[in-house]
C-alpha cells in the first residue's frame, strides 16, 4: 500500500523540517530585535507626548512642531492659544500676538522654549 513513497523521498523530509524550524526561530528572533530597538521606544515616546499634551497649562513655555515658541495664553479642549510676543500698533501701544494651535502640534516644553519665553519680558524692560 505504501509502495508509492520511495525511501529517498521519505529521508529527505527530515532535513527540510530542521531548516523550517531554523527559519521560524530566526524570524522570531528578528521580530524580537525589531520590537526592542524600534517599536517599544517609539511607543514610549508617544505615551510621553500624550501625557505632556494632556498636562498643558496656562503660562507654560512651549515649542510647536512648526517652530513657533511662546507661552500658553489659554487652553481649550482641542486647541491652545499661544502668545508669541507683542506688536506695536501705534506709538507706545502694543498688542499681543496670539495664535491658535492644535494641542497635538505642541512638540515640547523644552529648556530652549522656557529660556526664550523668559528673555522676552527682560528685553521689554530695556527699551
Image (spheres, helix red, strand yellow):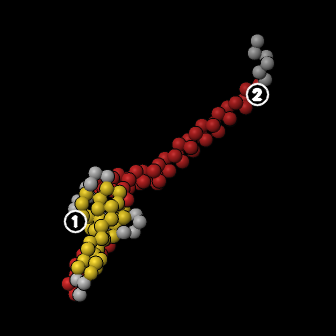
In the image, 46 versus 54, the foreground residue is 54
Q: Is residue 42 above or below residue 19?
A: below
Residue hosting label 2: 9
In the image, 94 versus 28, the foreground residue is 94
Which quarter of the figure has residue 25? top right
What residue is drawn where x is 61% and y is 41%? Answer: 23
- Disc 1 crowd rating (10 Å Cα; few below 14, some 14-19, many 20+) is some
Q: Is residue 69 left or right of residue 16?
A: left
Between label 2 and label 1, give the one nearer the viewer: 1
Residue 49 appears at what percent x and percent y? 34, 56
Q: Is residue 11 visible?
A: yes
- Mark sitting earlier along the chain (2/1): 2
Farthest residue in the left direction?
125
Dot 1: element: loop
Dot 2: element: helix
What residue is drawn where x is 22% and y is 87%? Answer: 126
Farthest residue in the front direction?
90
- Alpha carbons under labels 2 and 1: distance apart: 77 Å
Q: Is residue 11 left or right of residue 100?
A: right
Q: Which mark is residue 99?
A: none
Q: Are marks 2 and 1 in contact (CB under 8 Å)?
A: no
Residue hosting label 1: 59
In the image, 21 versus 71, the foreground residue is 71
Which quarter of the figure has residue 102? bottom left
Q: Quadrant of the C terminus?
A: bottom left
Q: Is residue 14 left or right of residue 43?
A: right
Q: Is residue 119 visible?
A: no
Q: Is residue 100 above or below residue 44?
A: below
Q: Quadrant of the N terminus?
A: top right
Amino acid at each position: 500500500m505504501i509502495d508509492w513513497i520511495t525511501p529517498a523521498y521519505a529521508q529527505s523530509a527530515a532535513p527540510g523540517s530542521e531548516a523550517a524550524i531554523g527559519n521560524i526561530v530566526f524570524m522570531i528572533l528578528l521580530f524580537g530585535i525589531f520590537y526592542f530597538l524600534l517599536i517599544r521606544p517609539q511607543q514610549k515616546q508617544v505615551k510621553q507626548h500624550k501625557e505632556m499634551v494632556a498636562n498643558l497649562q496656562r503660562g507654560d513655555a512651549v515649542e510647536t512642531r512648526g517652530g513657533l515658541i511662546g507661552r500658553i495664553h489659554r487652553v481649550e479642549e482641542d486647541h491652545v492659544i499661544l502668545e508669541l510676543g507683542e506688536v506695536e500698533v501705534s506709538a507706545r501701544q502694543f498688542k499681543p500676538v496670539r495664535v491658535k494651535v492644535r494641542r497635538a502640534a505642541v512638540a515640547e516644553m523644552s529648556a530652549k522654549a522656557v529660556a526664550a519665553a523668559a528673555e522676552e519680558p527682560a528685553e521689554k524692560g530695556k527699551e
